[in-house]
Image (cartoon, helix red, strand yellow):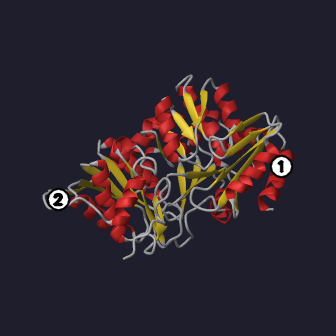
Amino acid sequence: MEIKRNAFKAYDIRGRVPDELNEEMAYRIGRAYVDIFKAKKVAVGHDIRLSGPAFRNALVRGLTEAGCDVVDIGMCGTEQIYFATAHLKLSGGIMITASHNPQDYNGMKLVREDSRPISGDSGLKEIEEQVVTGEFPPVRDVTSGQVTYADVMQDYVAHLLTYVDHSLLKPLKVVVNAGNGGAGAVIDALEPHLPFEFIKINHDPDGSFPNGVPNPLLIENREATARIVREHGAAIGIAWDGDFDRCFLFDEQGNFIEGYYLVGFLAQAFLRRYAGAKIIYDPRLTWNTIELVEKAGGIPVLSKSGHAFIKERMRKEDAVYGGEMSAHHYFKEFSYCDSGMIPWLLVLEIMCREGKPLSELMRERTACYPVSGEINNTVADARAVIKKIEDKYTPGAVKVERIDGLSVEYEQWRFNVRMSNTEPVLRLNVESRCDSKLMEAKTEELLALIRA
């Protein structure tokens, strides 16, 4: 079977099955992982995709043939692999998942000890080369690794519950939409420990995705959650992607909450506990986060976007929390990893403590800093377009940064434009200070230039 490079991305492995990613590649990834990282014992899990068990078998064969023991935690979410790797003090972990991609995709997310990410800068390119060439050290004298099975759910749930003060929680109605991904099992395990009334939709795991691919960022997928929130008079709606490392929130009116506003919201929650702590944020949208962190006595620290960069910067700065507008939220006490379960627990605690609906808690921030939302544009030459934007907008700007794409600030508005790592796409984000009309006008202005 032909081995292609297409599935190897900047931060993970992801491709269409079987032409871009297949079982032979999964086997080779296992062999390469052990050779490059000298791993002794590795956690393995898979999401709800139908190809997951076959990929698991091939991966485990590669790992064990190379002499590595495997702890199989079965069907799970990505953050459960992160948890198992750190909690069980393993050499690493591999999660078989394609997250929010279409049904015929699969992939892998890889970590080392302490759940440190493996990306293109930290070993993924070396794995790619071995997988493509098929050249591995001989294993004739290697003792095959052993496979054991572990259920980490109870310990994982116990850890999640440490993030909230149970004495503050009230019996609110909560709509949960697992999108037929893996989040439902965790909700079921949490339910006996929480006072909330969970209204469950698309709850059972089903890799055929009978209700569509679990990607709540798609506008057409949001109404499924919003409608149930309104029908049941729920306090909040929560939806997850397939491997539930991201959660997406809806207020009691069914309005979708942009992930950007949650970064400052959650930062405040941690700064109540850890006075003066550092908070990591990404450059796409920044003003709301910076203002809230500084008001709460924290130190905002800018990082390039992307989970590998955020996690590395958090460790370097000893930051307690990091957030991206893309709904990835990272926690020091969760091995600096991202979780789609911790954020909504924290938000519900804040709602219970403040005694205010989510719409009211968010209203001031969305008015202070209206945003365009991320707008993707397919272009023929992304670098040339960014150069045009740079030539037009940087003269006279108050601040210009190139830590991740191009960020340009004026007194009353700012924008970030950056290239995709994997496709000929420019991603645009615009925000303003208390002036939605200015934000909309500048967004249209930039889009006209990009699309010219």
Looking at the image, the residue that sits furthest to the bottom is 1
Occupied quadrant, residue 227: bottom right
Say which quadrant the C terminus sits in.
Answer: bottom right
Quarter holding residue 51: bottom left
To which residue does mark 2 refer? Answer: 144
Residue 123 visible? The answer is yes
Whole-number angstrom distance, CA of label 1 to CA of label 2: 61 Å
Report the amino acid beneath label 2: Ser
Which one is nearer the viewer's eye here, 235 or 79? Answer: 79
Is tag 1's residue or tag 2's residue first in the polypeptide sequence?
2
The image position of residue 310, as x and y in percent, is: 52, 41
Residue 370 visible in this rendered orientation of the protein: no
Q: Amino acid at mark 1?
A: Lys
Callout 1: SS:
helix
Provide the secondary structure element on which disc 2 rests.
loop
Neighbor class of circle 2 (other Cα within 10 Å; few <14, some 14-19, many 20+) is some
Apparent side of residue 133 relative to residue 396 in the rendered image (left or right): left
Which residue does the image show at 81% across and 56% down from the upper left? 449
User: At 50% from the left edge and 65% from the top edge, which residue is drawn?
Assistant: 180
Q: Where's residue 111, x and y in %?
A: 38, 49
- The quadrant of the image that shows the N terminus is bottom left
Between 307 and 433, which is closer to the camera in this rendering? Answer: 307
Q: Nearer the viewer, residue 441 or 254?
A: 441
Counting from the top left corner in percent of width and height, residue 384 is at 72, 56
Q: Quadrant of residue 216?
A: bottom right
Mark identifier at residue 442: 1
Question: What residue appears at the point 63 percent right and 64 percent down from the top-left corner?
Answer: 221
Marker count (numbered): 2
Is 400 on the left or on the right of 89, as rendered? Answer: right
